[in-house]
Image: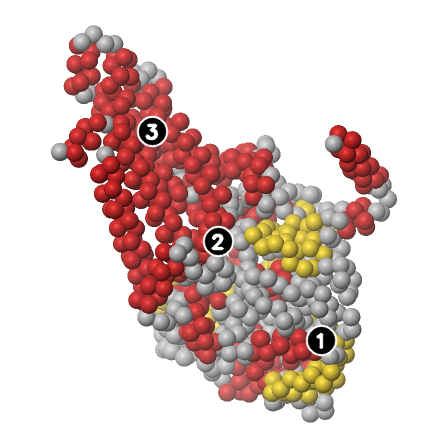
Amino acid sequence: MRKILAAVTALSLAGLLAACGGGDDDTTSGAGSASATIRIGSVYEPQNLDNTAGGGQGVTEALNGNVYEGLFRLTDTGAVEPLLAQDQKVSDDGLTYTFTLRPNVKFHSGKALTSADVKASIEKVTAENSKSARKSNLKVIKSIATPDDATVVVTLSSRSISFVYNLSYVWIVNSAATDLTTTADGTGPYKLGEWKRGSTLSLTRFDGYWGTAAKNAGVVFHYYTDATALNNALLTNAVDVVTSEQSPDALTQFSSNAAYKVNDGRSTTKLLLAFNDKVAPFNNVAVRQAVSQAIDDKKLLNSVWGDYGTLIGSMVPPSDPWYEDLTSVNAYNVDSAKQLLTTAGFPNGFTFTLDTPNYDPHPTAATFLKSELAKIGVTVNINTITADEWYTKVYQKHDFAATLQEHVNDRDVVWYGNPDFYWGYDNKQVTAEIDQAEQAKTTDEQTALLKQANKTIAQEAASDWLYLYPQIVVASAKLSGYPVNGLNAQFFAYGISKS
Amino acid sequence: MSRYLVRRTAILIGSLFLAAVALFVLLRMLPGSPANALLPVGATAEQIEAARRQLGTDGPWLSQFLDWLGGVATLDLGHSLISTLPVGPEISARLPVTVPLTLTAFVLAVLIAVPAGVLAATRADRWYGPVLNAIAQLGIAVPAFWLGLLLITVFALNLRVLPAGGFPPDGWADFGTAVESLVLPVVTVALVMSASLIRYVRAATLDVLGADYLRTARALGATAREAFWRHGLRNAAVPVIAVLAMELATTFLGAVVVESVFALPGLGSLLVRAISQHDYPVIQGVMLVSTATVLVVGFLGDVAQRLVDPRLRLRSAS
């Protein structure tokens, strides 16, 4: 027994020496890093592991692109590129899409990817019990055919220029897999390790991956409910990177320390003062403009995020193709706001109730708005509600005058084309433009139409877009290759290496 | 005593049943729906309806309640509406964090509070009596999360001797690491808890010190110290045991805040999350387990009081 122990010790010592010996040349960042496990700190723990069963933001962050892949991928810079689809053909009428699948793709369970899996995966998103936010986007699908194992033919009922983009949200899942809320079977560079609810979720490198192998041996997501606890974990090296910094006050302790890097990325999360555009007084365009102009967005952003974050003046973030700087529309101007109120028939102002979600930054923003609007004689009653109440009262019942809310996704300006959406904005021309944009033959045409629609909603102050959140990834200076923009909460971990 | 135990056990089971009924009904009266936690902004009206139907939360309460109760009787606490995982294992996975945290903190708190409380009462004339009392007063005013943050700043961020939070993913497999990660949370809970305990112990001791039987004992020739040790301490223990039982029970769930500050995957954090998602089976499971704990601890406290004080036994026998 003692001999065996000695041999084991000698071997491990040799291994240790070999590892140390490589320190001088580039093998540390190459071979050394390939065996490293990256510890990722996040506040978004998945609710379950299925993105069509209400897994939430956390499941996208941990599994999208890492464990599951789509036919297409939305890159960290917002571009759509082919992933499991090797080739696509679109018919002249824009109604038939033929996708050829990449060969030699295997699921983690070992099964080969076939067109049947793709069909089943798309149908999972459009199924009756699907909880996917993309369900309504994919309603346009009329039929899916699988002429052979490598070919998928999708027929649409009407043109949809965003179809390929929407497919980047559809995870290709093994059609034979069961119980995807607690297990996973995808084609990505990692397979699911273990999920310890309330604590960690680990991913390990998948050796049978068709593409470039992950640059690390695996990642472990460490979940925190408290932002301070998360920052402390980074400060004490319990985690290597924080996917999305939620606590602006904590930034100085990292930005002033050379051991950390603070990345100021582009988010798609907008903070909105959403009016109920269907009921008085906010059914009056002049009132909405007045309220928008009375609020100093710059000052608000500064007080919440300091030098981070940007003003966009509309619903479109810079990563959308139809972005335009509209901060000059209904810009901060108290005198003009007062005049607008007078023309609207409220020379002495009015009073309204602001339904305010009880979590940051909404209460802070609400107090700020209250003091800003007091300057033009408008009295704000702040009504603090839970996220759950917001969903029932505001989102479902439309029982509100104005509310604060953050909208996280890219390309969600299209909600202004739906008069039944919670804010009730109803402009026939905008609805038509947004519908036509989806039917457009070219992306240029789509872009032009959405720019036009966006300009109109900005001019009519359909909502007041207070600011665009920063996307701040804070990481140990030893780390490289992590995504900095995290569009739609994705966090591709396979490129990360640790020196 | 055995007849007392039987009666007391029957009361225990009855209370647990009533608590289960109350819990079930009160939860269903909350506004909101678990469907809200599952659906993203952008969900259509049909999706919301489909989710409601699928979750089965639209059925009659009575049948939902009987289903749940039937499950509980066979130790099946049902499945989470959100994660679809069974609730029982979910709870037992959290116990290895919450139980050691609570019990260790409790023992530590008692070890601090009993001597400190007695000293604060008996040594009111020395300098440390009032000081102990003042510290206890201050301790009651300090919120647990603040104390936790303070300890993290000092011991984790500055001195780097202990982790700032978290619990090893493989649990108690690595005993040393697991213990390390519980040191600061245990100290936080113990300090907060001992502050209020010190005051109870002090009050109970002062009560006893003024009692006739101590005067009698001293008249019979015992010194103040002898009289207190032989007669006083035992009498002071009776009200303190009742308080201890209450404290232990509340700490069991009172660790919620501390679990969040120290990012511990315990029962408290499970409950908080479940409440925000209206995950009824999880809330019911956690609350049932903790209610049972409170009742059992209360029961044990009663029994302990009887063992310490023979007068209570006589009263129930007559």
Residue A74 x, y percent position in the rendering: 68, 70
Residue at figure coordinates x 45%, y 56% from the top left = B87
Residue closest to the far top: B221
Q: Quadrant of residue A194?
A: bottom right
Determine whether label 3 and label 2 are within 8 Å by CB. Answer: no
Could you say whether the residue bearing mark 1 is in a helix, strand or loop? loop
Could you say whether the residue bearing mark 2 is in a helix, strand or loop? helix
Residue bearing mark 3: B198
Residue A6 drawn above or below residue A37? above
Residue bearing mark 1: A114
Q: Amino acid at mark 3?
A: Ile
CA–CA distance in space, label 3 to label 2: 36 Å
**Colour mode of the rendering:** secondary structure
Residue at figure coordinates x 46%, y 39% from the top left = B101
Residue A313 x, y percent position in the rendering: 56, 70
Please give left or right for residue B15 compared with residue A312 in the image.
left
Q: Earlier in the sequence, mark 3 or mark 2?
A: 2
CA–CA distance in space, label 2 to label 1: 36 Å
CA–CA distance in space, label 1 to label 3: 69 Å
Residue closest to the far right: A25
Q: Nearer the viewer, residue B256 or B128?
A: B256
Packing grade of label 3 (10 A; few <14, some 14-19, many >=20) is: many
Q: Amino acid at mark 2?
A: Glu
Could you say whether the residue bearing mark 3 is in a helix, strand or loop? helix
Residue B284 drawn above or below residue A454? above
